[in-house]
Image: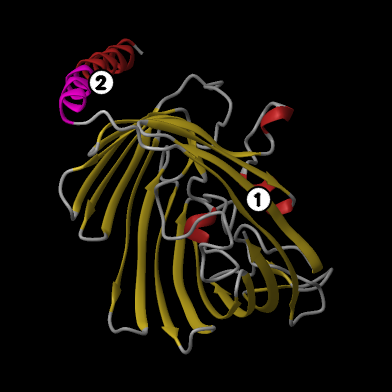
Amino acid sequence: MKKINLLLLLITVFTLSLNTRLNAQEEETSSDDQPATFSLSGSVDSYFRNSFSEQAAAPGSSFADLPGFALGMANAIISYEGEKSGFVADIVFGPRGSNAVFNSVGNSSEIVNQLYVYYNVSDNFTLTLGNFNTFLGYEVISPVANFNYSTSYMFSYGPFSHTGIKADFSLSEDVSLMLAIMNQTDETEANYMGTTTFGAQLGLFGQYINYLGGEDYNQIDFTGGFDLSDSFFLGINATAASLAGDQGFAGIALYPQVTVSDSFALGLRGEYFSETDGFGALVDDGDADNFSLTITGSFTQGRFIFKPEFRIDSASQEIFDISPTKTADSLSSFLVAAIYAF
């Protein structure tokens, strides 16, 4: 804790000193004030999901796992961007939102997806303090930003959000660096556990290498993608995490996406996920792995998005409850989702 306090003190002193010099330079070059911007955005989503089995079983990944006609979430993002500083308040309601903030303790924070304040120390250096969604992984909580409506195992069992302080540096047009000191993963309100995690992200030409580490936990993650043509994009995510002892998980996923027209695109996610020593994503004891193939269509009309999706999961053990008395090592399911973004 003494090292952490000293590091925070050094960051504060450095920031104040640098900002004083930058303000003096700005007063010499320009006195014009840049207007502040207030915005309200967000999304609403709902879906129907079923499986080709007697019981409406669902894959073990997060979200989109309820049977029949089901609710996603309502998401409202209030933001204010000034010349040097601003804030983001991201509020969620509904099952998807509740699952995203599952580790909230206080009732007042059970709807807080993100809540942070940032300060632009310079054009290339930003400090952020508060709760923000994770920087690891290809997928995110909002259904608007994901091509597939259901989510991967790697995203589901990695971190969702962090509370702490982070520093973002733009080192050049194609190189960026982020460093962070945070509470234990997904602790929204405060550091109740008394443990600290450290995060880092290196961005190189649109490809990102991420690290998250803390007490008995380490995860390294690669997230990137390439435009192979004007209409064909290939996304990539690979991750590996280790806990105390031999527990851990690893996985890799490819996300090929084809733009067919201005209003329709077709995407696929192929994911291989494995865990060791009963990590808990697939089994509570021993080792297990799962391969899933998800095909999603995306129809867009203005702010409305319609997504039909078919998914096949195949595991090394019988982990899917396909009836009240039977389990199976594979599961086929489908869903249709309606999303409105504003």
> Which secondary structure lies at badge 1?
strand
- Residue 14 falls in image quadrant: top left
Q: Is residue 257 magenta?
A: no
Relative height, residue 238 to residue 226 (above, below): above
* Quadrant of residue 301 within the rendered picture: bottom right
Q: Quadrant of the C terminus?
A: bottom right
Say whether residue 87 is left or right of residue 31.
right
The type of residue carrying mark 1 is: Asn
Badge 1 is on which residue?
Answer: 75
Which amino acid type is marked by label 2? Thr
Q: Position of residue 176 (x, y in %)?
A: 22, 47
Magenta stretch?
18-29
Q: Residue at x 54, y 55 (%)?
A: 156
Q: Does the image show residue 287?
A: no
How many residues crowd mark 1 within 10 Å: few (<14), some (14–19), many (20+)?
Answer: many
Q: Is residue 58 above or below residue 218?
A: below
Q: Residue furthest bottom?
A: 260
87 and 10: which is toward the camera: 87
Q: Does dot 2 land on a helix, a strand or a loop?
A: helix
Which residue lies under the disc numbered 2? 15
Question: What residue sits 35% from the left and 83% below the top?
Answer: 232
- Rounded to the nearest whole Å, what is the CA distance between mark 2 and mark 1? 33 Å
To which quarter of the image does residue 250 belong? bottom left
Res. 65 visible in picture: yes
Q: Give the mark nearest the N terminus, 2 or 1.
A: 2
Q: Position of residue 152 (x, y in %)?
A: 52, 64
